[in-house]
Image (cartoon, helix red, strand yellow):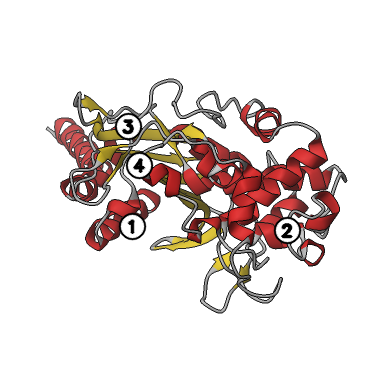
Amino acid sequence: MKAPLRLLALLLAVVLSAAACGVEGESPAESRRKELQQDVDTVLAAGVPGAVVVTADQGEQAANAWGVGDVASRAPMKVDDRFRIGSLAKSYVAVVVLQLVGERKMTLDDTVERWLPGLVPEGGRITVRQLLNHSSGIPNYEENPRYLAPYLAGNVTHVTTPRQLVELGTSLPRKFQPGTDVSYSNTNYTVAGLIIEKVAGTSLATQFDRRIFDPLDLDATYLPTGPDIDGPHAHGYFVLGKPPAADVTRFSPSIAWAGGGIIASSSNVSSFYRALLTGRLLTPALLKEMTTTVTGRSGVTYGLGIVPRRFSCGTWWGHSGNFPGYLVESYATADGQRQATVAMNYDPNSMHQKTKDAVGKLTDAAACPKKE
């Protein structure tokens, strides 16, 4: 009977091991889905139509989708749906600028005036570095009442040019003298996008394609020129006044351009940050420049198009972004080996604080598995 007893003990050990590590044969995506389910349920119960969460370890992605991507048709959210990623675009802009710096076509200490004479008041005192880390003092065009006027009037496909965005920002009182504080401003990245076009001699979209999207095979990522989203995508929702939320999927990307106009799938976003932080896009010296931060009097800390965020399992790097109807957050460990991307088709400006707290908890859970 000794041999059967030993066999029974071995089988029992295998069963217990499987119970501790998850169901035997369960995929990483299935395992992560179970871990995140409760946090996702809380977010959906708060009114968010749908969500996609992509987690990755050593390049192996686990993607899950919940809820609906289209409220009207009740079509389910899909893992390959595309979103407007908002201010995550700033990381992409900073990469292009730093690549141009690496090619010695420009420097971070170049002034705005050198490349765009007369565009920005006192542009000779503002450097490219100060644009990227938001220490320029240039006001945010979003604070100008004229910014959303045509859209709120019902013309959601109205086109605002990049130079008009800059004028909307620079017509406001300066926040502070360049280099003396930090204040987040989309105008900074509009100016940076215009500098890229001046230095490179091509459109910003072309530079994105050549330097990031094509080399990394990000086939679901692009900078749009019109209000429609190509390919499979989630519909975006925004509460205009009183609920229910309105479908604002067709919206002019010109309101954000370099500061937040990119469209991408969640998996593509995770792949971008992995490539960035593992050194595929920048040299170690340039990546160090990107992750060198400045901190303002308010306590806000910012790198060059990238932000450190403290999670329960450590500090990760990335960005959050929203565009009317959408919210996307994506972060990675400093070595780029792990990523967490959370995307939703609901605007954070439409969320109550409890909903925002639930989103924060879900993002932390995506970054930090319970087993840790």
Judge the density around disc 2: few (<14), some (14-19), many (≥20) Cα neighbours within 10 Å.
Answer: some
Identified at 68% across, 51% down, the residue is 191
Q: Quadrant of the N terminus?
A: top left
Q: In the image shown, does 366 or 225 lie closer to the viewer?
A: 225
Residue 352 visible in the snapshot: yes
Which label's residue is closer to the chain start, 3 or 4? 3
Q: What element carries label 3?
A: loop
Label 3: few (<14), some (14–19) or many (≥20) C-alpha neighbours in 10 Å: many
Q: Estimate the x, y position of residue 30 in percent, counting from the top left.
A: 28, 33
Residue drawn at (81%, 41%) of the image: 199
How many marks the image carries: the answer is 4
Residue that carries the numbered disc 4 in the rendered image: 325
- Label 1 or label 4, whichever lies nearer to me, is 4
How far, Cα to Cα, is label 4 from label 2? 31 Å
Residue tagged 3: 235
Disc 3, disc 4: CB below 8 Å? yes
Label 1 residue SS: helix
Q: Residues within 10 Å of mark 1 (few under 14, many from 20)?
A: some
Check disc 2 and report the residue beneath it: 120
> Which residue is tagged 1?
360
Q: What residue type is labelled 1?
A: Gly
Say if mark 1 contacts mark 4, CB within 8 Å: no
Q: Do the residues labelled 3 and 1 touch (CB within 8 Å)?
A: no
- Which residue is at the front of the view, 149 or 98? 149
Look at discs 3 and 1 and give the one toward the viewer. Answer: 3
Q: Earlier in the sequence, mark 4 or mark 2?
A: 2
Quadrant housing residue 211: top right
Looking at the image, tell me whether mark 1 or mark 4 is earlier in sequence order: 4
